[in-house]
Image: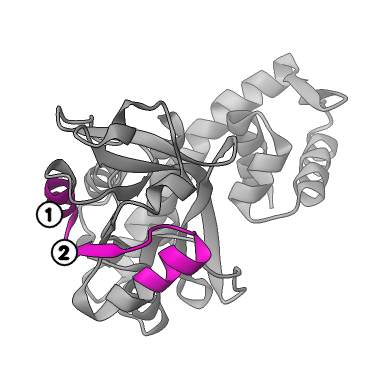
Amino acid sequence: MLLRQMKYFVTVIDCNSFTEAAEQCYVSQSAISQQIQALEKELGVQLIIRKNRRFSLTPAGEYFYQHSKGLLDEVNAVCRETIRIGQDEEARLRIGYLRCYSGQELYQAVAEFSSLYPEVSIHIVNGTHEELYDLLRFDGVDVILSDQRRAFSDAYVNYNLLQCGCYAEISTHNPLSGRQSVQLEELKQIPCILISSKEQQNVEQEYYKNTLGFGGSFLFADNLEEGRLMVASNRGFLPIESIGTLPPESASIRRLPVCRGEKQIFRNYCVFWNRDHSNYYIEEFAEILRKLIHKE
């Protein structure tokens, strides 16, 4: 129990928030508060000074925080080595991500995870939202980075990364490229370029047209490079979400916030995995990715 309480305590301090710490630890805010109070009672000293919605550390709390981080790192290292020794099969992590994903943090997360866990064989595949969902349902991947298109299911861990702004990449030859932002209605006069396999084109078009309200007509590209070449040649616009660090705009392409009225459109991006198949490596990868994205 003490190790769990230490983890809760360290997470609260790292997040500077009981609410965010509770989300990371998959418990309620009241539960994490009660565990820290129980920890203080067991130690017989006050660790946190609470004042309204803010808090600060006592000298004892500062000492406990610094040394708990080191102890938890050692425990995690012991767990990793135990897992490595105890597994008969080669350890692996199968990651799926959206074809239209354009951020840099996924690549950084894979590199960091591989450095920490060289014993784990990493397999990576991309696809549309529905392709990734099917891979997850039928055990084709262990974890996916995807947008939220349906209500969260209790069968999966729905690890919310962030709400990210929606942008349109438009050729500098298009008159709209001189704007600071672009209205969703204005984009309906321009073909919408979607990144999709041929099998999923109708599904993607249906979602972007009827759910998000994009596009009067649609064009399709197999990958981002092809899609951006189509934008550069002024054939249409490419919808992009700002999840993490996007590559810089080129000389021939502008990236404009897409607005409905006065507000930019936002969408949820998450890491999903099957709750019954959850394991240490999946949780570690999701946390590494979350930290990298929020760092930016």
Of residues 14 and 161, the one drawn nearer to the viewer in this rendering: 161
Identify whether 152 is placed above or below 81.
Answer: below
The answer to whether residue 112 is left or right of residue 292 is left
**Could you say which quadrant of the image residue 136 lies in?**
bottom left
Q: How far is disc 1 from disc 2 in space, using C-alphas?
A: 7 Å
Callout 2: 10 Å neighbours few (<14), some, many (20+)?
A: some
Q: Is residue 222 magenta?
A: yes
Would you place residue 144 above or below residue 49 in this image?
A: below
Residue type at mark 2?
Asp
Q: Position of residue 33 (x, y in %)?
A: 80, 42
**199 on left or right of 211:** left
Q: Which residue is found at the position 23% from the left and 76% from the top?
A: 89
Confirm whether residue 124 shows in the render.
no
Quadrant of the frame with the C terminus: top left
Location of residue 55 (image quadrant): top right
67 or 37, nearer to the observer? 37
Q: Residue at x 22, y 44 (%)?
A: 111
* Residue 25, image x, y percentages: 62, 51
Which three-letter amino acid code belongs to the residue tagged 1? Glu
Q: Which residue is mark 2?
A: 222
Estimate the x, y position of residue 288 in percent, counting from the top left.
Answer: 39, 44
Q: Is residue 217 magenta?
A: yes
Q: Residue at coordinates 11% horizontally, 47% vertically from top-left?
A: 229
Tell me if label 1 and label 2 are in contact, CB under 8 Å: yes
Query: Which residue appears farthest toward the bottom when viewing the image?
Result: 138
The disc at residue 226 is 1
Side (left or right) of 157 relative to 138? right
**Residue stretch in magenta:** 205-230
- Give the colour scheme of this rendering: one colour
Is disc 1 placed on a helix, strand or loop?
A: helix
Q: Is residue 22 visible?
A: yes
Disc assigned to residue 185: none
